[in-house]
Image: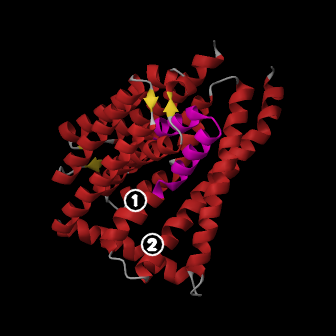
Amino acid sequence: MDIISLATDLSLPVLFMLIGIVLLVKGGDWTVNSSVFVARHFGLPPLIVGFTILAFGTSLPELIVSILAVIRGSAGIAMGNVIGSNIANILLVIGTAAFFINFKIKLSTTLIRDNIMMLFCSVLLLAFMFFGGVPRLAGAIMIALLISYIAIQYYMATKDEALSKELEDEINEIEEHEAEASSKQFMPYLLLILGLASVAGGAEFLVRGAKESALIIGVPEAVIALSIIACGTSLPELSTSIIAAKKGHTDMVIGNIIGSNVFNILMIIGATALVRPILAANYAPQLFDFDIWVMLGISVLFTALIFALKGINKLTAGIFIAGYLLYNIYIYAMYIGA
């Protein structure tokens, strides 16, 4: 197939994926902000809002994409989405944010605990994949671990005045923004409905576009999920991390990315497996043979940099970004060149 024919055949699936990413990103933003505003309107404390609505809402696009994918018989998209997102969060998001400002990281009990949790979750997913995938029981274990993790985080936050204040400020900022944007009382509720509809519609477009693109290019669906879908669903983290880094909130950037990686594994893989088991027979062997090891290796490297160097400079950031580009080139070349 020549390049012109390939480009023509891919035009509609790529358009579907672009529409899907836009709807997911915008819909996720509307859903989170409106949910926070509504929850605070009904008197929920900032800490509760932060550890439930804010935490779950930011992972909603990836969750809906993965659940829809397994329902449609595309386990490779579900698994590839999570592995690819975790790789993108560290190499692309942290790399890009650290490129704007050198990260000076202050080690804290919270950061150490969350780093260990991220590594544990990565090893746990590797173990499940080694034994044939993620059945419903494994999904239930992941959800139970997630609930325990959130409960511990909430308890620690109630004892940490600085963390409580930081989270309360973040919630208040969202409230003020929504109050300014919503001149009418019903607007947050309308935006909440529109947000959820956009996320659902975006997931449909993205999964359909990914399946068709994989078929045309001749690569497993997991490759599209590892690259385009993962990068697209990481865009919210990328934009917020750059803004936070420019303001000097590097600890917040690191914390958010670590938390996102934990949620991706425990919540998205866990909840998706409860809907339909994610079995090895239904996704590309490459995910276990190569990609999960890349994710684990990058997580270990990232943790080592934080503990040993207590920071990430622009050179390291550049290496991260270059590494992400090379990784994406390699996973396509592995199949296209075959």
The answer to whether mark 1 and mark 2 are in CB contact below 8 A is no
Give the class, few, some or many, for how many residues have Cα within 10 Å of label 1's Cα (few <14, many ≥20). Answer: some
Please tell me whether mark 2 sits on a helix, a strand or a loop: helix
State the residue at coordinates (21%, 63%). Answer: 155
Is residue 329 shown in magenta? no
Amino acid of disc 1:
Ala
Instruction: Give x and y (percent) for residue 188.
Output: 56, 78
Q: Which residues are magenta?
A: 58-85
In the displayed structure image, the side of residue 238 where residue 25 appears, left or right: right
Residue 57 location, x and y as percent?
47, 60
Against 287, residue 124 (above or below) is below
Q: Nearer the viewer, residue 149 or 173?
A: 149
Residue 312, visible in the rendered structure:
no
What's the CA distance linking mark 1 and mark 2? 11 Å
Q: Which mark is residue 319?
A: none
Q: Which residue is mark 2?
A: 36
Q: Quadrant of residue 217?
A: top right
Residue 242, placed above or below residue 228: below
Disc sitting over residue 55 in the figure: 1
Classed neighbour count for the residue bearing mark 2: other residues with Cα under 10 Å, few (<14), some (14–19), many (≥20):
many
Q: Is residue 72 magenta?
A: yes
Residue closest to the eye, 318 or 21: 21
Sooner in the amino-acid sequence: mark 1 or mark 2: 2
- Report the amino acid beneath label 2: Val
Instruction: Give residue 14's position: percent from left, percent from top.
Output: 72, 41
The N terminus lies in quadrant: top right
Q: Quadrant of the C terminus?
A: top right
Q: What type of secondary structure mainly makes up the magenta span?
A: helix
Residue found 39% across the figure and 41% down from its top: 90
